[in-house]
Image: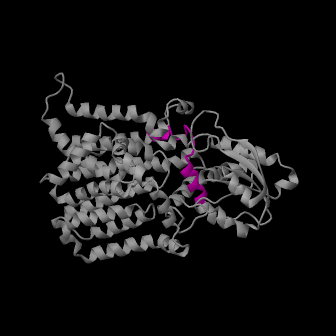
Amino acid sequence: MHWRGIAIIAVAAFAVEMAVSARYGYVRDELYFLSAGHHLAFGYVDQPPLTPLLARAAAELGGNTLIGLRVVPALGLAALVVLTAVMSRMLGAGRTGQLLAALAAATCGEYLGAMHELTTTTPDFVCWAVTLLLVMKLLDSRDPRWWLAIGASMGVASEAKWNIAFLVAALAAGFLATEARSLLRSRYLLAGCVIAAALAAPDLIWQAAHGWPSIDVFRALQGDAGHNRAVYWLGQVLYTGPLLVPVWVTGAIWSVRSAAARPFRPVAIACVAVIVLQFVLGGKAYYSGAAYTFLLAAGCVPAERWLAARRPLAGRIRPAAVLAGAMLAGAVIAAPVTLPVLPARALHTVPVQKINYDLGEEIAWPKLVALVSGEYHALPAAQRQHTTILTGNYGESGAIDRYGPGFGLPQVYSGANNFWLWGPPPAADTAAIAVNLDPAFLHREFRHVRLVATFWNGLGVSDDEQGVPVYVATGLRSAWAQAWPAFRHYG
C-alpha cells in the first residue's frame, strides 16, 4: 500500500468537509438525531439506535456545536477513501491505481454530499464498505475465521440502518453463484451469524415491543417508489458524478468478467445486484451508494493499466495525472450541489436543492424558533403557563429542542415518528402554539384556533418550512391521553 499518498487524499477530503461544515446549519435529520440522543434507547420508530448515539457523543465531545457534530461524517469520508484504496490494492492495483481509487472516493459527489451531515447514511456507508472489504479478505485468504469479523460488521451496520439487509442478500447470491459457495460450509459462518444476530437483537426487540412501527415507516416510504424508479438511474449518474461513471461502469464489467478479478466475483455480483435490487424495489437513489466503493476500486485497476500504456501528453503529462485532474475538476464543478459552498441566499436563484434536497433544509432554523418564541412570549403570562409547543414534523421539533431553551421555550412535542412516543404534552396544558399543523385537524382537537404568523426564511429559498403557518390553539377538547393518538404520524 502507498499509504502516504492515500493519507494525504483522506486528510484533504476531511479538511474540505470541515471547511464548509458550519457554512449553513443543521439539516433537519441532524436536529432529530440530536433530540433522539437525549432519549437514548435500543431502537426508534424510524431507525436503529447507532446514529442518535453518535449524535449524542458528538454533541458531548464537541460542545454541542455544529462543527463538533460534523467531525463524525467528515471522518466517515476519510474512511471511505482509505477503504476504497485498500480494496483496489487487493484487486491488483499498483501505486497509481490505489491513488486513483482513493481520489475517486474523495471526489465522488455522493460521498461528499452524504458525509457532510451526520445522518443514518454516514455509519451505513462506512459499515457497508468495511463489510465489503472483510468479505474480500475472506475470499482472498480462504480463511473462514473472517466470517466472525464479517458478522460483527454486519451486526454494527444493522444498528445503523436496516439497509444492510439488502447487501446481505446480495452477498448471499454472489456466493451461491460462484465456487466461493464452499466457504458457506463453515462453523465460523454460523458463529458470525450469531454475532450479527446478537448485535441486531436490541433494535429488533425494541421494534417488537412497540408493535413494529418500522412497518408504517416502510409503508410511507413505499409511496414514493414510482418516483424513485423514474429518477433512479439518472441519480446514479448525478450522485457519483458523470466523470466517475466510466470508472465504476468499467469496474462493474471488469470485476464480473475478468479472470484477474475472479477470486472476488461474489463481491462484484453483490454490488451490481444490490444497485439493481434497489431500483426494482423503488428505493431511493442513494440507498446502494456504498457499493460504489468496490466498483470504483475495481475500475481503477484496468484504468491504471490502460493509462500506463498511453503516451504522455505534450511529451510530459502522464495520462493518469489527466484522469486525476478530471476527477478533481468534476468535484469542483459539482461542489455547489454536494456542499454548501454557495451563499445561502443563492439557493433562491440557483435551486441546487432540486438535486441535493438537504441543502435547502439547512437554513434559518434559529429564525423559525425565534418566531415561535415571539408568539409564545406574546401570550398573557397566565395563558403561557398552560401552553405547549406542537409541530408538524420532526425537523421543526428538533430545531425547537436544540434552540428553544435559549429562547425560553418549554418542551416541544410532535406526532412525528419518535417524537410521538416522547409525548403527550403535560396534562395541565390546554393550549398550544402549533407550527405547521393542518388547521382542520387543530379545529377537531381545540375549540379555538387562530393564525398568528407565517414563517418566511428571509432568503426566498423554497424548503419545507417556507410559508408554514403558526397557530395559537386553545380549549383542548379532551385530555391529552385521549387526544394524543390522533397526532401520531409515522413516515
Position of residue 363 measured from the top left corner of the image (x, y, whole percent): 59, 40
Q: Looking at the picture, does residue 461 appear above or below residue 78?
A: above
In-image side of 69 versus 87 (left or right)? right
Position of residue 446 measured from the top left corner of the image (x, y, whole percent): 76, 59
Q: Main secondary structure of the magenta part?
A: helix
Region rendered in magenta: 16-37
Whether residue 454 can be seen here:
yes
**Looking at the image, which residue is at 15% across and 66% down?**
179
**Looking at the image, which residue is at 34% across and 73% down?**
193
**Looking at the image, which residue is at 47% across and 72% down?**
204
In-image side of 230 versus 210 (left or right)? left
Q: Is residue 98 magenta?
A: no
Whether residue 284 can be seen here:
no
In-image side of 474 versus 9 (left or right)? right
Position of residue 70 measured from the top left corner of the image (x, y, whole percent): 51, 47
In-image side of 68 versus 262 (left or right)? right
Q: Looking at the picture, does residue 425 appear above or below residue 372?
A: below
Outermost top residue:
314
**Which color mode does the image show?**
one colour
In the image, 5 versus 438, the foreground residue is 438
Position of residue 299 measured from the top left corner of the image (x, y, whole percent): 23, 45
In the image, 67 versus 398, the foreground residue is 398
Please give the count of numbered marks on the rendered protein: 0
In the image, 435 versus 29, the foreground residue is 435
**Looking at the image, which residue is at 57% across and 31% down?**
345
In the image, 36 versus 169, the foreground residue is 169
